[in-house]
Structures are given as structure tokens and as C-alpha cells.
Amino acid sequence: MTVVTSDRLTFDYGAWVAVFEGNVVVADATMQIAADRLVLTFAGTNELKSAEATGHVRLAHPSGNGRCDRVVYSAEAGRMVMSGDALLVQPSGSIGADEIAFFLRDRRICFVRAAGNVTMRHVGPAGQTPDFLPPDTKKRPKL
């Protein structure tokens, strides 16, 4: 179950679009997102098609935390794209960039691609693979 709270909600039943504004918080079993605004698009049913959070976006996930100006989630692809001063922090290090894209699979971050002013900090022991990279790099999904 996913719960969204905000100061205001506008729902367009014809377009299947919900717009949450002011103190938006999204919480489910795997992730929490806080933002100024959230737009949810549904696939003509209660099934989520996409989500876009903007303004002071903060993410909390068991695999790590993040912040950015905007994040877009595609439900079909399982992909999230953070943009605007994006930062993704995990126990083994962090990635900061203009844009960070990653896939959520099995309730964990399984692949990261960063572009524009990229900075990576790895704090794990020498030779340890960062948590945000899959062990088999040949199976990376295309972003």
C-alpha cells in the first residue's frame, strides 16, 4: 500500500492524473519521498504509470538516500531519474551529478548512471564493489 499526504490534491478523472501540492510525502513499504509537488499519472485504472516529484525532493530507500530538484519514476521500466543537483548516498559512498538514473529491482538499487558534473565518493574497503553497482556488469539495463 502507498500513502500520499499533501496540503492540496487535484484529480482529473478524464486524464487519470493526480496532482498533490504542498508538503507532499509519499510512503510505501520500500521508499519515502518528500517534495513540494507530485504528479501521478495512472494507466486508465488504479495502476501507476508514472510519477514526477518536483521542488526540494528527498528520497529515503533501504539501499540509500537522495536529494534533487526533480525525480521522475517510470513504473513499467522500474526506472527513476533524479535531476537538478542530484545526490545519491549509500553506506559505501555517494554519487553527485546533474542527473542520476537508476533502476529499482527486488527493492534495491541495481544500476546507476550519472551524467554532468559527476562526483563519486567510495568509502568501502579497497576492492569492494559499491552497493549501487550490480556484481555482473554485463547485465546492466539500458538507461
Image (cartoon, helix red, strand yellow):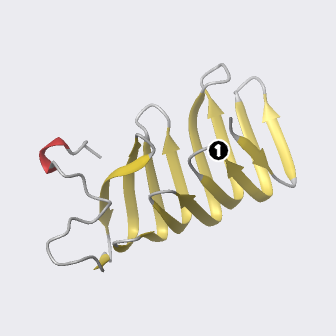
Residue drawn 45% across and 31% down? Answer: 76
Q: Residues within 10 Å of mark 1 (few under 14, many from 20)?
A: few
Q: Nearer the viewer, residue 13 or 101?
A: 101
Q: Position of residue 143 (x, y in %)?
A: 30, 46
Q: Is residue 50 above or below residue 110?
A: above
Percent across and percent down for residue 21 are 79, 54
Q: Image point 45% across, 49% down: which residue?
A: 80
The percent position of residue 126, horizontal first and vertical second, equals: 16, 78
**Image position of 35 (left or right of 62):** right
Residue of label 1: 28
Q: Which residue is rendered at x = 70% and y = 27% of the image?
A: 15
Type of amino acid under label 1: Asp
Query: Picture coordinates of residue 89 (x, y %)?
Result: 44, 71
The part of the image, by quadrant, that contains residue 78 is top left
Q: Residue 89, relative to residue 37: is it above or below? A: below
Q: Is residue 43 above or below residue 120?
A: above
The secondary structure type at the circle numbered 1 is loop
To which quarter of the image does residue 116 belong?
A: bottom left
